[in-house]
Image (cartoon, grey):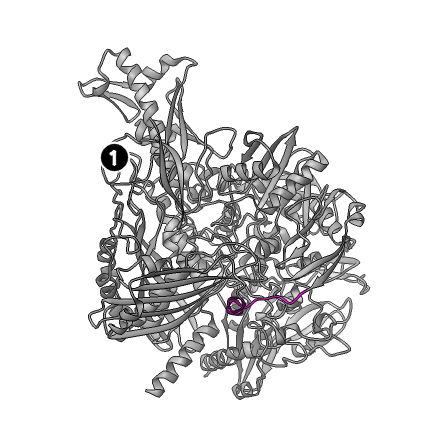
Amino acid sequence: MSAPTLSRPASLDGLDGAGTPLAGGTDLVPLLRDGLVRAEELVDVRPLLPRGIEDGVRIGAGTTLAELERSAEVPAALAEACRLAASPQLRHMGTIGGNLLQATRCWYWRLGVPCYLHGGNRCHAREGEHREHAIFATEPCASAHPSDPAAALLALGAVLETTSRRLPLAELYRLPTDDDRRVTTLAPGELILRLELERPDASVYLKAMDRQRFGFPLVGAAAARLGGETRLALAGVAPIPWRLGSPADLDAATPLPGTAYKVELARALVRRALAAVAP
Amino acid sequence: MPELVVNGGRFAVAGSTLKTLAETLRGDLGLTGTKVACGEGHCGACTVLLDGEPALSCITLVHAVGEREVTTIEGLRDHPLVEAFVRADALQCGFCTPGQIVSAAALVGETPAPSREEIRHGMAGNLCRCGTYPRIEEAIASWRG
Amino acid sequence: MARLIRTEKEVEGRYTEQWVVVEEDPLDRWPAGPLDVVGRPAARVDGLRRARGTARYTADVALPGMLHAAVLRSPHASARLRRLELAPALAAPGVRAAIGPADCDVFSEEAGYQGAPVAAVAAESFGQARAALALVEVEWEVGEPLLDPDEAVRRGQLIDEPDRYERGDVERGLAAADVVVEAEYRTATVLHNALETHQAVCAWEGDELTVHISTQWIWGVRKDVAKRLGLAPDKVRVVCEYMGGGFGAKNDPGDHTFVAAELARRTGRPVRCALTRREENLASGNRHATIQRLRAGARADGTLTALEGEFVMAVGWDGFVSSTAGPMKMLYACENVRTVELGAKLNTGPNDAFRAPGFVEGTFGLECLLDELAAKLDLDPLELRRRNGADADPVDGRPFSAKNLGECYRRAEPHWARRAEVRARSEGPWRRGVGLASQIWYGGGGPPSYAFVRVGSEGDATVLTAMQDIGTGTRTAMAQIAAEELGLPLERVSVSLGDSARGPYAAISAGSSTTPSMGPAVRAAAADAARQIIEIAAQRFESEERVLSLRGGRIVSEDGGAWTLEEVTGLLGDGQILGRGSRGPNPTGMRVLTFGVQVAEVAVDVETGEVRVERIAAIHDVGRVINPLGAASQVEGGIIQGIGHTLSEQRLLDPASGEALTLTLDAYKLPTIADVPEIVTELLDVPDEHLTSLGSKGLGEPPIIPTAAAIANAIRDATGADVRSLPITREEMLRALEEARERAYAL
């Protein structure tokens, strides 16, 4: 493996899509060093990304999780999802844009097993050890998406502005298919620049993890109430952040033997989240 | 050749683009107070400050540090937290301790009088296998002596 | 005078009988309780160095011209090497040597576990060495791994013969019982994860080898390396000045030392061989999983009539069968006990000692079973334990050198009495409860061990001994002991340790033995130096030796005079006073053990299965306490590791391939600061009158032993659910709650 080049352009204008953008690097750098992501050219976009919070609902993609955690303006669900994510160091390093794009923690995938998500023909977790894995869309890949903020932002109806388009956050994600194993719809070189949320009347993020801090979500549950509508989303339950139409949707979960407990966990968290945002 | 600002000094940076800040500090600059215990961002032993904010030097590419000033434990040797850690016996084997102190310095930089809850939240990224956590909490709660 | 004795040597509960040359320990015992320095809290003498990052660990050793090794390991749990071609790696940039099974006996063509070492390269940088490994051409014939310990037992694939123990008549005991309880307990494989990984730097000068190594036993490494490399022991120098944690996994040189030594020999350059975190979690030892099928019978008044246990241990491809039946044999005065320990040989990484191996696991099973028994008997769990206390070792009837478990129970009462108040604080889904568990363990240490004390004309003292401080604070404890004996303030005593070339033989730092083994030797050396100072003073001041003593940096006469120490030592000029001391024997015919009890308070969210440990009171009897500050830290550290084992830590394997999945510290979940409860430590601090001139026992292991059972018993108290499998993850807690609900419906 030869090392990539690293460029530090003066502006985002010249990006041609050839390079792999590097911002906080908290996920990308380990993946590069493990050879799970290959890049010929790294582009250091960290100093160039829009950064900051306007009115609590317009957020630069380069804003760190630590900044969002401390913000009194952003909706509670987002601040809390950031507060309960990762560790203080990772929250100071990691950007919200990068957080939405982080890869699964599936141990098979992380250890480089030639699994479905890596382009192989089967999901090793389904037959193997999968206590941290999915309860929805468990076929053909049972990985779980680890982002806490993504679930919060789904519930908050976030819209993304990228270098080439505007799209609802839900459209950033796709389930892997036989002919395309990616879990996002981002084009090569396309960068998330900003996020815009709806301002909820109330919102909350609740998280279950294996220790009190510094753990990926076994289940994270976000709820946001806007007028008469309450939106729900879950982290850690599917290969991508998961919108839940209603608590009853949990009846349609298709857990693996080792993830059945997550359905019970999700029911409890969703019930509590709904109670917390109820008028 | 790109430069790195560490504890107020400027150093030339050499090596592969995938070289980490921790490798540079320990291997090239001899600043071995920064420890590497997991090498992939999961334990906090390698914590340094970048412009005062805590960062994991084992997953920070040295060439992407740019103009941000790096502060290592060597740059904090006279920080009152060092004495506070020793006084509270907030270390056993000591391998995680420099990283703990750097994280604590970042914490009290943002929140000079952190509550117990803020200490537990702000220090959760630094693992201590010897289990000196109660004393770390005590050291930070009493860091001003 | 030197004396040759036949004695039992004990390390972590494993006894061997051997000849030992010992010297009597003629010193009077110090009075109980805090003295001038000993028994008083002392900050670590090396604290500033460690905190400032200037302490040099093996990880920081960078010798001129040093090469870096990387080890090729089997990716399969069971495989045979079909072909190995090192030449492409040897030709890679920066590579200076490559070795395989033909070159070094740590490598094998048969891999019995994932991570078994196969070959290694040395290169100018670690990155180059790692890159070269990828070029090694290797073909494997992959076999079917055996991973199920019960299946291994069925097939008779065992490490060692089954260890059977029986006293009395268990059938008769069960027949005499009014109540019998039976349950199966399981504990997971857990990983040490010292933050400094296993590593060594080896450098040859002619036929002399220097080994810098992160180790718990400098002299054990010296002996093993010399033996295996065919060197005279004095040709091997072992250095470990600062050490980043071991917890039992660093008692021997390990494969990495021999890899480094061989590569260093071939290249003529120093070679570092350091495990990565992933290698550490793959192939550097573990606490093996257990399955415990237990039965207990008791009369209505709580008297135990029978204890029976089958213990199946998932030892791995190699290693040792830890004494999981120990607590069942030793803790209670039950007449009828039968146990069998079966060590399953599996295609998993070899186990290694891990902080009270066997007793942590066995105490979880036994002490949970006792609570299930107490519930059936409708007896207070503390009272049940009291009624079955043993006055002598139940195994062989030997008297205890000291046993104050009853006093520990008495001191536990106020914590135990919080039950009603704690339960009453249950609200909503959060149920609260209290549980306790007892602790029994070794920790007496033993001979041989030696120390020198050097006093120069300035009147300061240096303790010289080639021991190691693995982070437990023994440097500080030894300085305190010498300071006490010499009547010096602590800051006038320094300790030189960590180098076999700079001091005499010192004991292993394992089995809670460092302080009880080394402390008396250091005290004897200091006393020898003090005696010489007094001899000189008596001559200088024309006084009698018997009226002189050393206190507060002065020589004090009962007749009224007092002189500063420098007034005597100043006479030395370049001369030095050299004191020497050694560790005397353990008391003959007695059982030297440590005891304690922990009381845990927990909160359980019965809807999400979240368990929070809110408070643990730890009451232990380890004899005299040298440094209450460091001792409390040891207790806290043991409990926090125990909480990890109880709630979040487990090594997971792919059930088909046996490949380990939890190699990184995101997947393998150690406790963080946010997981720590309030911890209340109470040490009895009563010197063991039969054990050495100090009366001190070790404290490294006792505090981790009862934690899991105390937590599980508190969970039962809070929720009625029986958690019988560690770790108590969300799914295990929710499963146990569901089971308890079903049991309630059925009634």
Q: Is residue C414 left or right of residue B67?
A: left
Image location of residue C484, percent across then percent down? 31, 31
Which residue is disc 1 drawn over? C30
Q: Quadrant of residue C453?
A: top left
Image location of residue C36, percent across then percent down? 27, 34
Crowding near the residue tagged with mark 1, few <14, some 14–19, many ≥20 C-alpha atoms within 10 Å: some
| Secondary structure of residue under mark 1 | loop
Tell me if I can see residue A200 in this picture: no
Task: Name the quadrant of the C terminus of chain B.
Answer: top left
Residue located at (36% from left, 45% from top)? C698
Image location of residue A107, percent across then percent down? 62, 66
Q: Nearer the viewer, residue C338 or A234?
A: C338
Q: Which residues are magenta?
A: C143-155
Q: Nearer the viewer, residue C483 or A151?
A: C483
Task: Name the quadrant of the N terminus of chain B.
Answer: top right
Tell me if I can see residue C357 in this picture: yes
Quick check: is C316 in the magenta stretch? no
**A252 is higher (above) or lower (below) than A141:** below
Q: Amino acid at mark 1?
A: Trp
Residue located at (45% from left, 50% from top)? B130
Image location of residue B107, percent across then percent down? 49, 53
Which chain letter goes with mark 1? C
Q: Nearer the viewer, residue A190 or A161?
A: A190
**C346 is higher (above) or lower (below) than C300:** above
Total numbered labels: 1
Q: Is residue C643 left or right of residue A26?
A: left
Q: Quadrant of residue C58?
A: top right
Quick check: is C154 in the magenta stretch? yes
**A117 is higher (above) or lower (below) than C17:** below
Q: Is residue C339 left or right of residue A217?
A: left
